[in-house]
Image (cartoon, rainbow, N blue to C red):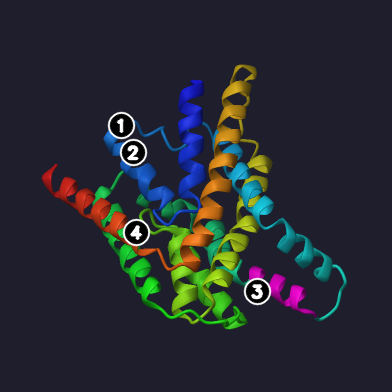
């Protein structure tokens, strides 16, 4: 892989992991536009590296929260941090079940079906628009909320449904404080990413070539820096109710994808 390609893919991964525009949807559209089905996962190792970079960027942005949560969790007491950790675990259940039992069945959605992607982008646009209209509150994420948000994250496996958009919008529509919604959305995905990385590493399917070190490093740095920027930016946008910007983008992108699907 060329360094330029690695950097571009890293930036795309870093930005779309946090901005509510659906990374999987954009990758599927990229397949069609570029006529190359290998673009999203030119190598499993490269994909793992990029996902680790975005997970790390989340941990850096929320380092104080993570430290507080871990400190409270290992105090082995019934405190706010322990309850928050339990909510994160609950939110992971729906997506984890799909990943464990329906991974093969989900592959059918990742075959360059731009009509599906376009339709799901319209769903994302609607969710973001509705979330922007919701009044801000000071409500925390409840245990029931965490399960519903987890279901939204599982549905976001579909290309075109933004994971961050779906989980943040669902949280806000449930009445959760917007800043707390963004915090929960970004933290809840870290264990899933790390779990997926561990699964891929243990599968023995990763291939490594010495001449790919530079590309891997470039992609990692690009994804990490883009992730830092996108995560921080997204927190501000959610707090200031600016999600309509991305709703319009998803509406336009979805409409164009559907038009292209009908035309071709």
Q: CA distance from mark 4 to mark 3?
A: 30 Å
What residue would you read off at disc 3? 87
- Cβ atoms at labels 2 and 4 below 8 Å apart: no
Q: CA distance from mark 2 to mark 4?
A: 22 Å
The disc placed on residue 34 is 1
User: Which is more toward the observer, 164 or 40?
Assistant: 164
The disc placed on residue 84 is none
Q: Secondary structure at mark 3?
A: helix
User: Which is more toward the observer, 137 or 46?
Assistant: 137
Q: Secondary structure at mark 4?
A: helix
Percent coordinates x, y for residue 124 in the rendering: 35, 63
Sequence-first tag of 4 and 3: 3
Q: CA distance from mark 3 to mark 2?
A: 35 Å
Sequence-first tag of 1 and 3: 1
The disc placed on residue 245 is 4
The disc placed on residue 30 is 2
């Amino acid at each position: 892989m060329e360094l330029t390609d690695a950097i571009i893919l890293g930036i795309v991964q870093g930005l779309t992991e946090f901005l509510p525009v659906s990374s999987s949807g954009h990758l599927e559209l990229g397949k069609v536009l570029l006529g190359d089905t290998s673009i999203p996962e030119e190598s499993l190792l490269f994909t793992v590296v990029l996902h680790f970079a975005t997970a790390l960027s989340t941990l850096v942005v929320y380092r104080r929260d993570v430290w507080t949560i871990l400190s409270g969790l290992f105090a082995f007491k019934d405190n706010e941090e322990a309850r928050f950790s339990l909510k994160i675990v609950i939110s992971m259940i729906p997506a984890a079940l799909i990943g464990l039992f329906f991974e093969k069945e989900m592959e059918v959605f990742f075959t360059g079906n731009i009509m599906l992607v376009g339709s799901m982008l319209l769903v994302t646009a609607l969710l973001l628009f509705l979330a922007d209209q919701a009044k801000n509150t000071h409500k925390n994420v409840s245990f029931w909320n965490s399960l519903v948000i987890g279901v939204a994250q599982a549905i976001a496996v579909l290309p075109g449904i933004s994971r961050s958009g779906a989980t943040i919008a669902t949280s806000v529509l449930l009445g959760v404080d917007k800043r707390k919604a963004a915090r929960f959305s970004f933290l809840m995905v870290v264990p899933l990413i790390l779990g997926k990385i561990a699964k891929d590493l243990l599968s023995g399917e990763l291939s490594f070539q010495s001449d790919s070190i530079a590309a891997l490093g470039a992609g990692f740095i690009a994804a990490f820096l883009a992730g830092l920027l996108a995560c921080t930016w997204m927190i501000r946008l959610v707090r200031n109710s600016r999600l309509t910007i991305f709703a319009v983008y998803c509406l336009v992108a979805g409409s164009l994808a559907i038009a292209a699907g009908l035309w071709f």
